[in-house]
Image (tube, rainbow, N blue to C red):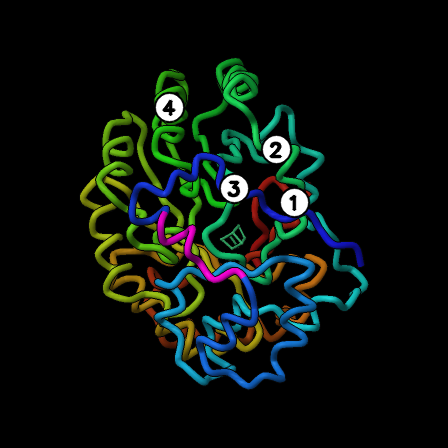
């Protein structure tokens, strides 16, 4: 298998604030990760093979929530490359959601009625091994400010659009100057009502929710929704709870989407604990996605029949408002497809 294009280094990465410093100091090689957690050396070979295809990235704040010496830690399993990533699995592809078909302008994906997705940053603060964009050609979709005008013109000209979704990579990996400019431009488009931000950064580096971010987020007239990405209750520590509280104070509605992952969260008790912990943090469970069939991630798959049984069990333990919707994203469908 060819080595894939890696996410580019942060463009505006003068590490002058705490979260940027933490990101620049993230662990970026498997040897260090394995040594820091005191894991057996035999894990290294597969980790190096997987890392060659999709590089490792683990910030210290996330590492601190893993159990030392525990190779099956559910957070570690999300970020430690495996030899299985080199397997070529039939039905698994580089662009499982066929996003290449829906890009009318650089950095813009328009798949669903009423809303568009803007790739606000090609970078992430963590590299999740199951990521459906692990092969995404970010180099072609990292617009300059002049190119952003094309995307903004597209939004201005389509009055059916009511929601702009910032995605990535992770949109909050862009710096606040860039984001403040973009959100100001979006707020000036009269037919837009909502700003949605899909991000894992408040979970991975909770210090990302700082005064600079809250300033531009609080200033926009748009209604604000943030969809976090948390797969296991152990990801929610006090720092994450505090970050969520700051966001709620700024008028942000908080939702969560998870991915159903083999040996991470594929049992009802784990998912029930996650929903309860999310609610304690002021976040409502939204979606539980089955895995997108991205090449290199097949070892995380949970079959549909098992996923349905799991959800039925979960329903016996949780009130309806804590039940995530089990969905699959199917290319060409007008929305996520419930299972
Ligand atoms: S944070 Fe999201 S976009 Fe980034 S690697 Fe993880 S799943 Fe992919």
Tell me whether the residue at label 2 lies in contact with that at label 1, contact meaning CB atoms closer than 8 angstroms: yes
Q: Is residue 116 left or right of residue 101?
A: left
The residue under the point 46% across, 84% down is 70
Residue 310 within the segment the image draws in magenta: no
Which residue lies under the disc numbered 2? 141
| Front residue (pair 187, 16) | 16
Mark 2 and mark 1 lie on one chain; the one further toward the N terminus is: 1
The N terminus, quarter of image: bottom right
The C terminus, quarter of image: bottom right
Tell me the quarter of the picture where residue 138 sits: top right
Which residue lies under the disc numbered 4? 181
In the image, residue 174 sits, relative to residue 220, either above or below, namely: below
Tell me whether the residue at label 4 lies in contact with that at label 1, contact meaning CB atoms closer than 8 angstroms: no
In the image, residue 135 sits, relative to residue 12, either above or below, namely: below
The local secondary structure at tag 2 comes to loop
The local secondary structure at tag 3 comes to strand
How many marks are shown on the rendered structure?
4
The residue under the point 64% across, 25% down is 104
Residue 240 on image: x %, y %: 28, 59
| Front residue (pair 264, 316) | 264
Residue 186 on image: x %, y %: 40, 22
Q: Is residue 128 left or right of residue 92?
A: left
Mark 3 and mark 1 lie on one chain; the one further toward the N terminus is: 1
- Identify the disc placed on residue 168: 3
- Identify the disc placed on residue 79: none
At label 4, counting other C-alpha atoms closer than 10 Å, the crowd grade (few under 14, some 14-19, many 20 or more) is few
Tell me whether the residue at label 2 lies in contact with that at label 4, contact meaning CB atoms closer than 8 angstroms: no
């Amino acid at each position: 298998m060819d080595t894939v294009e890696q996410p580019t280094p942060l463009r505006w990465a003068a590490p002058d604030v705490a979260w940027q410093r933490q990101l620049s100091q993230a662990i970026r090689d498997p040897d260090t990760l394995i040594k820091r957690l005191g894991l057996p050396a035999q894990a290294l070979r597969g980790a190096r093979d997987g890392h060659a295809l999709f590089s490792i990235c683990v910030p210290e704040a996330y590492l601190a929530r893993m159990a030392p010496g525990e190779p099956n830690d559910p957070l570690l399993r999300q970020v430690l490359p495996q030899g299985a990533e080199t397997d070529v699995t039939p039905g698994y592809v580089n662009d499982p959601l066929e996003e290449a078909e829906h890009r009318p302008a650089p950095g813009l994906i328009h798949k669903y009625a009423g809303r568009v997705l803007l790739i606000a940053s090609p970078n992430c603060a963590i590299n999740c091994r199951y990521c459906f964009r692990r092969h995404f050609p970010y180099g072609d979709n990292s617009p300059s400010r002049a190119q952003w005008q094309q995307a903004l013109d597209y939004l201005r000209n389509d009055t059916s659009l009511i929601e702009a979704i910032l995605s990535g990579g992770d949109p909050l990996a862009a710096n606040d100057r860039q984001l403040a400019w973009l959100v100001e431009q979006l707020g000036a488009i009269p037919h837009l009502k909502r700003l949605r931000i899909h991000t894992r950064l408040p979970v991975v580096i909770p210090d990302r929710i700082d005064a600079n971010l809250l300033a531009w987020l609080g200033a926009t007239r748009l209604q604000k929704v943030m969809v976090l990405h948390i797969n296991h209750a152990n990801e929610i520590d006090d720092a994450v709870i505090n970050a969520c509280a700051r966001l709620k104070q700024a008028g942000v509605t908080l939702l969560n989407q998870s991915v159903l992952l083999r040996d991470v969260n594929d049992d009802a008790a784990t998912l029930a604990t996650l929903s309860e912990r999310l609610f304690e943090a002021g976040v409502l469970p939204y979606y539980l996605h089955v895995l997108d069939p991205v090449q290199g991630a097949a070892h995380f798959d949970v079959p549909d029949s098992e996923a349905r049984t799991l959800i039925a069990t979960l329903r016996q333990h949780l009130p309806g408002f804590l039940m995530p919707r089990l969905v699959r994203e199917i290319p060409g469908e007008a929305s996520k497809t419930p299972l």
